[in-house]
Amino acid sequence: MVRRVLGDAMRSLNVSETCISDMLLAVSEACSNAVRHGGPANRYEVTASIGSGQCDVRVADNGNGVPSIPPHFPPPDTENGRGLLIMRSVVDEISFGITPGRGTTVHLRKLLDPGDGADTRPRQLAAV
């Protein structure tokens, strides 16, 4: 559902498909991490805003948090551990808010590339 709503919102603003794909990949990875590491209830909250030439998404969970982004990808035969690196490679900014015992918030920011035939008038979409 998050992918659909965010993708449709970005398309309505004539954002390039490459930019949309990058952001949706990062958001999918953040949501997957929230389900996997976000605490026993597997609940998380996603907030997004688009405007001023950028898309900001926050994915918040109730888990213990991530200590840091690993410096390199794990070995090819490892099943997990690539999500943070993938997010870092496709967005312009990634940051973490970690509150011990209260969860983690992953903040993703992507500068928006206009798509072909983009409307040059500035447009904004309210927070989703």
Image: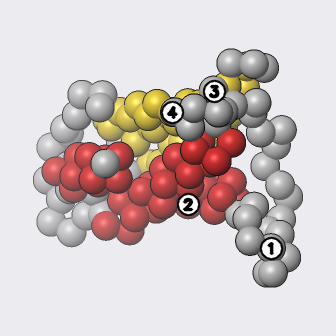
Q: Are marks 1 and 2 in contact (CB under 8 Å)?
A: no
Q: CA distance from mark 4 to mark 1?
A: 26 Å
Q: Position of residue 80 (x, y in %)?
A: 73, 65
Dot 1: element: loop
* Dot placed on the residue nearer the N-terminal end, 1 or 3: 3
* Dot placed on the residue nearer the N-terminal end, 1 or 2: 1
Residue at the spot of label 3: 62
* Dot placed on the residue nearer the N-terminal end, 4 or 1: 4
Dot 3: element: loop
The relative height of residue 50 versus residue 72 in the rendered view (above or below) is above
- 7 with respect to 91 (left or right): left
Q: CA distance from mark 1 to mark 3?
A: 26 Å
* Dot placed on the residue nearer the N-terminal end, 2 or 4: 4
* Dot placed on the residue nearer the N-terminal end, 3 or 2: 3
Q: Dot 2, crowdedness within 10 Å: few (<14), some or many (≥20)? A: some
Residue at the spot of label 2: 90
Q: CA distance from mark 4 to mark 3?
A: 7 Å
Q: Are marks 4 and 3 in contact (CB under 8 Å)?
A: yes
Q: CA distance from mark 3 to mark 2?
A: 25 Å
